[in-house]
Amino acid sequence: MADALIEVKNLSFRYAQHDSMTLDHLSLSVEKGSWTTIVGRNGSGKSTLIKLLTGLLENKSQDAISLFGRVLSEDTVDKIRLHIGLVLQNPDNQFVGPTVADDVAFGLENLDLSRGHMEQRVKEALENVGMLDFYDWEPARLSGGQKQRVALAGVLALHSDLIILDEATSMIDPIGRQSLLALVKQLQNRFGMTILSVTHDIEETFLADQILVMDHGGVALQGRPSQILIEDQALSGFGIELPLSRTVQRDLLALSIALPSGYLSEEELIDQLWQLYSKK
Amino acid sequence: MAIVFKEVNYSYQSKTPNAFQLLKNVSFRLADGSFTALLGQTGSGKTTLLKHINGLLKPSSGQVIVGDQIISSKTSEKDLADLRKNVGFLFQFPETQLFAPTVLQDVAFGPENFGQTKPSAEQIAKKTLEMLGFDMTLLNQSPINLSGGQQRLAALAGVLATEPQILLLDEPTAGLDPSTAKRVMILFKKLQQEKHLTILMATHDMDAAAEFADQILLMQQGKLVKQAAPKDMFQEKELVFQKILALPKVTTFAIRFAAKTGYTNQKLPISEKELISFLQRALSQDPSGKETTPHA
Ligand SMILES: Nc1ncnc2c1ncn2[C@@H]1O[C@H](COP(=O)(O)OP(=O)(O)OP(=O)(O)O)[C@@H](O)[C@H]1O
Ligand SMILES: Nc1ncnc2c1ncn2[C@@H]1O[C@H](COP(=O)(O)OP(=O)(O)OP(=O)(O)O)[C@@H](O)[C@H]1O
Ligand SMILES: [Mg+2]
Ligand SMILES: [Mg+2]
């Protein structure tokens, strides 16, 4: 792909503690300016992949990973990292400073910004995630969802080209989660940022341009949401829930209600139902 | 064991002038053997409330009564030892309760601590992990080397292995893949029904609350704003409108359908089965409101 921002070819990885491979000849590609969502069972290797992509784990498959058109290696990793905003699965691993503001500012230290500019970015990011009131709080006193919001602010403040989110909103209330994900979508649309997110929430995949289903250390399915979300049996086999619109569509078809059988988003399904409703 | 809150207030640093009030005059009663979902936005006080039930936090004023144990600001740590044997607490962040060198040792720790021999504690640990569908090839791994979801299952196994009478679950399915989450929720329901456990579960999963809980407590900014059965709670248009309450997916679907079509129906569905009959009814009703034969 000409415009691939992330390109992974035949990546394999084994933890020293294990006999078998955690990632096994995994290949994927992520287009610049797109949103890719990774789903898959617990232990399928999602976080391991993220850590390899960001250099947190050392990759022994040479040349397997390229980012921004450069091969990820010991020599390039520091430079490449400057362009990536990463939220890890456990927000506690990311807190380093005595206050919330210090934490958000931490990632900015490498960016050569003036004090004033930095403070402005921190405030803006905290405002965007609804946490400005907690500016000088101790991170340890935050609730679970508040911690995740602050971790997300740390990434938003970076204005990076690539944002990687590993279950970054798993403990945020549904209304808050939706608005934060919409905010991320806006960054993609407005500034062409590339998004790679890992989630167990099937609704998050609706925002994506590409879904990757991981299973046993490999990519089991890969495609546009409308291609993947219709693979009922395969998805169930990989432990993934079907979107509500899909199960409702199936239930109604089984009751002989005249609906198309191809993929329908929730909006499209409701539209179809509305047509049936007004035709009666 | 029943759980009762009587006018519970809790302030952080309650003796200082800049005290922060996290629970405000909270009162409720949960019957012995009930399954309750604790809902509320991020920061509304769910974790703080749960911590009062096993005495990790004590009320600044008011009382928490668990079984026949009364917890007030004056209760001493040593009075809480018996209570803690009966109350299992799954923390919001599982890694905060995993500490042994291996998964097996970690899960066996509780039963051994409560008097089982080492071999029988390990037997219980294995049985519990297996029941949860934990990957048994990881028994001798260090808990810190597990994936996020595996950590939560291991922490949960540690809690269940002590056979508590009360289960406090702080977002038990966050980080679990959907099929594992479902399996775990079904197990909780079974423990309630067959072993008569009293369960209180903080969650952001409205679908699980609707499907598994008998009743819901809704928190907002440290206050208990409503206690009701799921079928009543999720009809609360005012609370939904104020964004205090999110709805199950099926309920949202019905509302979107109704908004698009103008179809009005008294009761909103809270399960997929109810949604399907809701839609079926809508599609078979003529505009005058009379039922006609369903689309066949
Ligand atoms: N630091 C580590 N050392 C040894 N094994 C590990 C380590 N981290 C993860 N593993 C193992 O590698 C496998 C993949 O873990 P990973 O964290 O990548 O899964 P995941 O897909 O992110 O799962 P989850 O959905 O539960 O977060 C798991 O079986 C896990 O036990
Ligand atoms: N030790 C503490 N000191 C001061 N404030 C605290 C402390 N712990 C929690 N808080 C604050 O109390 C409020 C309630 O926190 P709590 O953890 O109970 O929320 P929660 O409902 O569990 O949220 P979440 O859904 O995000 O886990 C939050 O605003 C939080 O910042
Ligand atoms: Mg993970
Ligand atoms: Mg909490």
Image: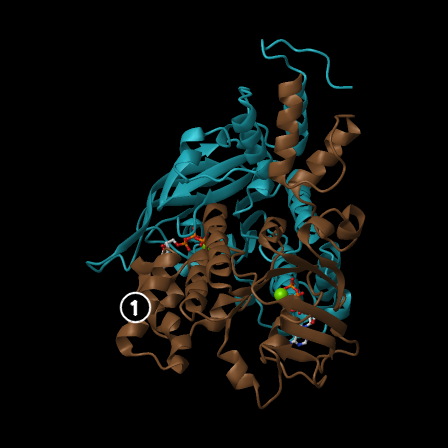
Chain colours: A brown, B cyan
Q: Toward which corner of the image does residue A97 lie, by quadrant?
A: bottom left
- Above or below A71: residue B133: above
Residue name at image x 67 percent, y 79 percent = A65
**Residue B124 to residue B230: above or below:** below
Ligand 3: give its quadrant.
bottom right
Residue under label 1, please give it: A120
Q: Quadrant of the C terminus of chain B?
A: top right
Q: What amino acid type should be assigned to the residue bearing mark 1? A: Gln
The spot of residue A199 in percent (x, y) is 61, 58
**Residue occupying image coordinates x 71% and y 83%:** A16
Q: Is residue B156 left or right of residue A97?
A: right
Q: In this image, A48 relative to A168: left or right?
A: right
Determine the residue positioned at 64% across, 41% down: A265
Residue A131 appears at what percent x and percent y?
Answer: 35, 58
Q: Is residue A64 visible?
A: yes
Q: Chain of mark 1?
A: A
Give A154 or B25, whichever is nearer the viewer. A154
- Residue placed most toward the observer, A2 or B239: A2
Check the image and report above or below for B99 versus A187.
below
Q: Position of residue A272 (x, y in %)?
A: 66, 30
Quarter of the picture holding the N terminus of chain B: top right
Q: Residue B79: percent from the left, percent from the top?
A: 43, 56
Up the image or down, B256 lies above or below B157; here it is: above
